[in-house]
Structures are given as structure tokens and as C-alpha cells.
């Protein structure tokens, strides 16, 4: 947030809003992979972003970033879009091709771990656990012909994911500032940042809107979006950075509401 231009107190409020006033807080204490994937993916982004700021594309830093991005996919498959987007982000940012190789190699090693796991656990590199559901309610959704269970997206699902009593805005009202932040980043021609935010959130939102069980079961808010929330908070920070007092009041109020919910 500071690097995006926020003053210290607004930057602290953005961080606290994410940590205490979104579904990140309950899932940080549950045995779900969503918050781990969020941490891995965002840490990878921070390493690549710092390389851009420092103009220091070290092989070690890019290898670590690739490992984090790759293991994020091992942890949660839809992170594939975000992790691939980070590679595009690095190329767009001017990373030399010889420095991209450590990122790709590290991600490939993680992919190899996933292939070995699938083979050992389910009998083949492309055999997913969803092929072997035993509960009838899940067998009706997942199959070898449709292992992801995804269907065409619907407007009702998309709307419910955002604004229903189970939706993102109810459980994380601070994200209402994100569109303003994206607009602000666009004015500043920070298109690389807009790209990674939109890709990270949009890919998870799109997958969620295509899933018949979009609620994620008996869950706190739209848990399938969790791994994209740190990236969405970048847009929230951009909305507050360099703006008037109104945005800071909106941030504080929405953060308090999220904390109460």
C-alpha cells in the first residue's frame, strides 16, 4: 500500500481490513488451502514486483518466485491462471529472458510434484481426485467427462457471489473501493498492475460463476474467491492512495463493517 502511494495510516488500514475484515480471517484458522494459496501467490507477485522496482532481476529471486507460484497451483488448481499471469507480468515488466528460466524451471518442478502425486494417489498424471468421488451428491457434479464440475456461467450466480447474503460485498465490504482503484491505476497507466489484479480476481470469479455449488457448502462467504483477495486489495489501496479524506472515511467505515460481520 505504501508503494502504491498510501500514507502510513491508510496503508495500515488497508492491511488490517484485509486481515481482519474479509473472509481471510476465518480461513486462516481452517484446514482449507485457500488462504495458503493466497499467501503463496501474493508472495510470488511481491518478489516479481520488487524485482521490477529495483531493476534487479536476480536468478535466485525469480527461482523463489517461481517456486511460490508453482506451489500455489499445487495447493489450489485455479491459481494456474494467476501464476501464468505472473510470468506474463514479469515479461511485460522487462525481465530478461535468461532470468525467466529460473522461474519456469521452479514452476515445472512443482508441476512434477503434482504429476507424481496424481499418479501415486489416483493412478495417472491426469487423474484428479474429483474422478473418484464416492458421495452421490458430488458424483452428480464431478465425473471423468467433467472433472471440474463446471458449467456455463449464469448471471444469477455472478450476482449472488457479489451481493447476496453469502456474497463478497457482504463479508468484505471494503472491496467496493476496488473499481475506483482500478480506474485510478488506469489513469496512471499502470496497466501491468491492472492486468494482474483483473486476471487474478476475474479468473477465480469466472470459475466460481461456472460452479453449481458456488457457495462452497456451509462456508463463510464465497470461499472460492479467497486466493484472489490480496490482489483485489491492491486496487483498494490504489483507491485510497493520494485521494481525499472521503476515500479514507469509506475505507475505515467499510473495514469496520467487515470486522463486525
Image (cartoon, rainbow, N blue to C red):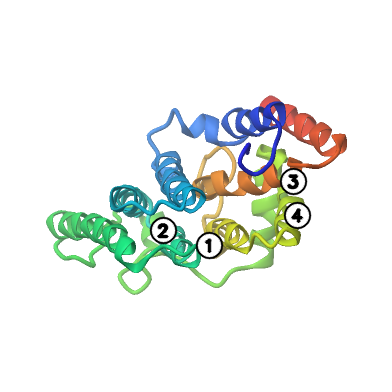
CA separation, marks 4 and 2?
Answer: 24 Å
The answer for how far apart the CA atoms under marks 1 and 3 are is 22 Å
148 relative position to 189: left or right: left
Q: Which residue is mark 3?
A: 239
Q: Residue at x 41, y 58 (%)?
A: 83
* Circle nearer the N terminus (2, 1): 2
Q: Describe the element under mark 1 as helix, strand or loop.
A: helix
Query: In the picture, which quadrant includes the C terminus?
Result: top right
Q: Residue at x 82, y 39 (%)?
A: 247
- Residue 78 quadrant: bottom left
Which comes before the other along the chain, label 3 or label 2? 2
**Residue at 34% in and 53% down:** 62
The first of marks 1 and 3 along the sequence is 1
The residue that mark 4 highlights is 184
Q: CA distance from mark 3 to mark 2?
A: 25 Å
Q: Which residue is mark 1?
A: 203
- Tell me the distance, in whole angstroms, between the alpha carbons under discs 2 and 1: 11 Å
Rendered view: 210 above or below 197: below
Q: Check whether the beta carbons of the residues at disc 3 and disc 2 lie within 8 A of each other.
A: no
Amino acid at each position: 500500500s505504501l508503494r502504491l502511494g498510501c500514507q502510513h495510516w491508510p496503508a495500515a488500514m488497508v492491511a488490517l481490513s484485509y486481515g481482519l475484515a474479509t473472509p481471510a480471517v476465518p480461513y486462516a484458522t481452517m484446514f482449507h488451502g485457500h488462504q495458503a494459496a493466497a499467501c503463496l501467490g501474493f508472495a510470488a507477485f511481491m518478489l516479481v514486483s520488487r524485482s521490477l522496482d529495483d531493476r534487479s532481476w536476480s536468478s535466485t529471486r525469480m527461482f523463489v518466485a517461481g517456486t511460490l507460484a508453482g506451489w500455489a497451483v499445487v495447493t489450489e488448481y485455479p491459481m494456474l491462471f494467476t501464476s501464468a499471469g505472473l510470468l506474463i507480468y514479469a515479461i511485460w515488466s522487462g525481465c530478461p529472458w535468461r532470468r525467466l528460466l529460473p522461474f519456469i524451471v521452479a514452476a515445472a518442478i512443482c508441476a512434477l510434484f503434482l504429476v507424481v502425486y496424481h499418479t501415486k494417489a489416483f493412478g495417472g498424471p491426469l487423474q484428479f481426485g474429483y474422478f473418484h468421488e464416492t458421495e452421490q451428491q458430488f458424483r452428480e457434479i464431478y465425473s471423468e467427462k467433467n472433472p471440474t464440475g463446471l458449467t456455463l456461467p449464469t448471471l444469477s450466480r455472478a450476482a449472488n457471489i457479489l451481493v447476496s447474503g453469502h456474497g463478497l460485498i457482504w463479508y468484505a465490504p471494503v472491496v467496493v473501493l476496488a473499481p475506483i482503484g482500478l480506474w485510478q491505476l488506469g489513469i496512471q497507466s499502470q496497466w501491468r498492475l491492472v492486468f494482474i489484479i483483473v486476471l487474478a480476481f476475474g479468473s477465480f470469479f469466472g470459475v466460481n460463476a461456472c460452479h453449481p455449488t458456488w457457495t462452497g457448502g456451509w462456508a463463510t462467504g464465497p470461499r472460492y474467491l479467497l486466493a484472489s483477495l490480496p490482489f483485489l486489495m491492491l486496487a483498494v489501496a490504489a483507491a485510497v492512495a493520494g485521494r481525499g479524506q472521503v476515500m479514507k472515511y469509506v475505507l475505515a467505515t467499510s473495514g469496520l463493517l467487515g470486522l463486525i460481520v
